[in-house]
Image (cartoon, helix red, strand yellow):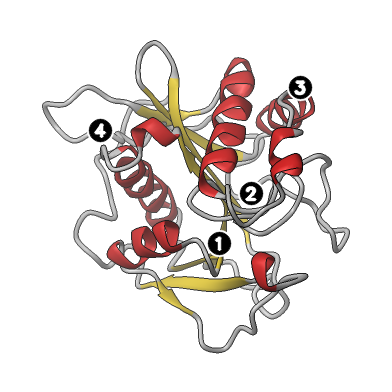
Amino acid sequence: MRLRAPGKHSGFTLRRPPTAATDRDGRQTAPSNPRTSGSTRADHGFARPGRPRRDRHAREDDAEQIAGLQVAAWRTAYAGFLPAAELHGLGTAALAGFWRDRIGAGADVLVHDGGRRILGFSSFGPARDDGLGQRPDVEELYAFYARPECWGTGVGRSLMRSTLSVWAERGTRAGYLWVLERNTRGRDFYRKGGWRQDPTAAPSGSGPDALEVRYELTGIGTRRGDCAPRAHRR
């Protein structure tokens, strides 16, 4: 969602797909969450009763598909306001290596598994913005992407429910993300899910086409649908 190469935030948002383990400010791009790292994870019962479970924690062998769908989302979502040469030049090899390393290190990455392929993914963890990094009840949504052909089909909504379920279960009460100001599709998606632009955060970016705004979601765990039934541990 934040404009970084390849990036901090996501497919409905911006931030270029990650090329390294640090962002432009030298901070870790996708840190492991101390509340989950090094421990056996639960699948959190992401699916609703009576429906097959499709959202799950990512595995290292999902990395290539995650990278491919992220690049596809970038090329579609940002065509027209990011340089065509830059979008065309996006590759998946380095990006796949980045996600493989992050997943292997225990970073929080969920995928929406369509059976034959991964249709979307969500990456999140400890807050990194100044003033928020010391709050254990606040997390950041680093990346949120779905395959362009799956936009509007419910993949994003499912992943968001699952992300909020994880947050609610471990006591996170507020989340935030950065989204490209010109990304009206992404901003509409977040607004429909209850996210609101944070009036206390100044826009960030290197130019009008790369300007990002911060969105926040509060009251996580207190709303109906934030918590899913607990699942068996793997």
Q: Quadrant of the N terminus?
A: bottom right
Asked which quadrant contains residue 89, the reply is top right
Asked which quadrant contains residue 191, the reply is bottom left
Viewer-nearest residue: 72 or 166 = 72
Q: Is residue 189 left or right of residue 126?
A: left
Q: Which residue is mark 3?
A: 93
- For the residues labelled 2 and 1, say whether their Cβ atoms are less than 8 Å apart: yes
- Circle nearer the viewer, 4 or 2: 4
- Mark 1, other Cα within 10 Å: few <14 / some 14–19 / many ≥20: many
Asked if residue 196 is positioned above or below residue 66 in the image, the reply reads below
How many angstroms separate mark 2 from mark 1 (CA)? 9 Å
Q: Residue extending furthest top?
A: 116
How many angstroms separate mark 3 from mark 4 (CA)? 31 Å
How many angstroms separate mark 2 from mark 3 (CA)? 25 Å
Q: Which residue is mark 4?
A: 47
Label for residue 139? 1
- For the residues labelled 2 and 3, say whether their Cβ atoms are less than 8 Å apart: no
Disc with the residue nearer the chain's start (2 vs 3): 2
Q: Is residue 171 left or right of residue 143?
A: left
Q: Position of residue 12 (x, y in %)?
A: 48, 51
Disc with the residue nearer the chain's start (3 vs 4): 4
How many angstroms separate mark 1 from mark 4 (CA)? 22 Å
Q: Secondary structure at mark 1?
A: strand
Q: Amino acid at mark 2?
A: Asn
Q: Is residue 175 left or right of residue 28?
A: left
Residue drawn at (43%, 63%) of the image: 184
Q: Secondary structure at mark 3?
A: helix
How many angstroms separate mark 4 from mark 2 (CA)? 23 Å
Label for residue 33? 2
